[in-house]
Image (tube, rainbow, N blue to C red):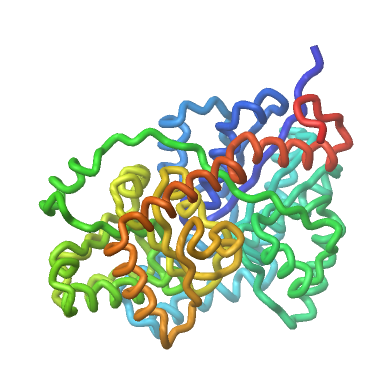
Amino acid sequence: MTAKPKVLIYTDCFIYGGSERLMVFLLKNKKLNEEFDFMLAFRNHKEYFRSLSHDIKNLKIDVTLYPLFALSNATFFNKLNRSSLPIVIRNIIKMPFFLLEKTGLYFAVNFLLFTIFIRKIRPQIIHVNNGGYPGAPSCNQFVVAAKACGVNAIVYQVNNIAFSTTNPFSLLYDRFINKRVKYFITASVKAGNALVEKRKFSKEKIVQIPNTVFTEKVTKTRIDILEELQWQEDSFIIVQVAFLTARKGQINLIKAVERLRFGNSSDLSNKIKLILVGNGEDEQMLRQFVFEKGLSDVVCFAGYRLDSVNYINACDIFALPSIANEDMPLSLLTAMSYGKPVLATRFAGIAEVITDKENGLLLDPISETIVEKIRASITELYTKPDMRINLACNAKKTFYEQFSEDIYAQRLSNLYACSSMIKSKQFNN
């Protein structure tokens, strides 16, 4: 019996978020596991390892994990950003670590450690998973190490819109990475175009593979959550699952809820509720805003949750009013898979998933008008239950027709086959 090709996934993030869970869903995919032998390596830190291990155990995934030591400022800087220290003090603390990284010491150490590891594992295919680009520096370092070890089948996943640069050294490094990667994976067309336009990557190397999610079991009902929060059964619940940061637009969502709570619509004002699932650098600011506006009985901060599907399942509307640096969030696909009406912004990959007034509502992320548009859209969805039902049904249909696990497996299997010049036994179209 011919051994299955070994695929080594490497990923690095200071939080265990959507792009990280995508790799776990990949590992859970039955069809991909029939064809490939997967291993998962990642830059090790306590919070990430704990959340990843919980997911692996909960989803009953049989995979070898390799927590790797790698020098990085990301986790430490993230903790600083979430602290209550003044921004000036935070920047002063960061400065020596930032300068130390710029000396090239981090690169040298990580390259050596990665090279030793890859030579030991000897994978046929390496799949690097990065939150954005340039994103985590260790992802590019892993590419360099993999190529030095003679691995030619390197695919590189970019889960966000790339940032522009005019730095000649960065552009030179990009050229180096471009030559050594066989294919770059993006979930959306816009993210792929950004890699070409902003970082000058080869257009023929960009492959679009839309994200997918594994439909997880709901362990708490809507009634359970209402009882926990001591909310009435007729509450109209809006849920967002996202990192608490400016680009995710939580402040605009809270402001819209404030207008509804204290507006003229007495019926909705008494029923409106908002659950924010996640943590992040803006959490203290958002909590303070909610307190000052008298919304503590309306807005719930649920924190970072591995059971976020319970809250999505319990909501009347799933909202994702992102304003920047977004692509194709897994929480959006999860909401669609559960048949929830979606209210989101016309941004990057979101607009490639949601068609306005067909399987969700899309708003333009214009700062001057976004709060009022969110308010008006929530009101419309509340007063038109038939519209909510129609959008929800179409959202679920869209997910299973375009973003299902089987479709994702077929696309990724074909890419692996092309990158390594092996013949795909399961999928050949």
In front here: 300 or 404?
A: 404
Q: Find residue 377 and report its horizontal and vertical position in percent.
A: 36, 70
Q: Find residue 119 and report its horizontal and vertical position in percent.
A: 77, 37
The answer to whether one can see residue 352 in this image is yes
Q: Note whether 311 is above or below 297 in the view shown.
A: above
Exactly how many numbered labels are in the figure?
Answer: 0
Q: Is residue 193 left or right of residue 11?
A: right
Residue at figure coordinates x 47%, y 33% from the top left: 56
Residue at figure coordinates x 77%, y 30% from the top left: 427
Which residue is at the far bottom? 368
Residue at figure coordinates x 18%, y 56% from the top left: 235
Q: Note whether 64 is above or below 329 in the view shown.
A: above
In front here: 296 or 361?
A: 361
Q: Find residue 310 and report its horizontal and vertical position in percent.
A: 32, 43
Can you say which quadrant of the picture contains the C terminus?
A: top right
Residue at figure coordinates x 54%, y 25% from the top left: 62
Q: Is residue 302 left or right of residue 393?
A: left
Q: Note whether 3 is above or below 55 in the view shown.
A: above
In front here: 152 or 189?
A: 189
Can you say which quadrant of the picture contains the N terminus?
A: top right
Residue 97, by quadrant, is bottom right
Which residue is at the far top? 1
Q: Find residue 176 and report its horizontal and vertical position in percent.
A: 84, 63
Residue 193, by quadrant, is bottom right
The answer to whether one can see residue 278 in this image is no
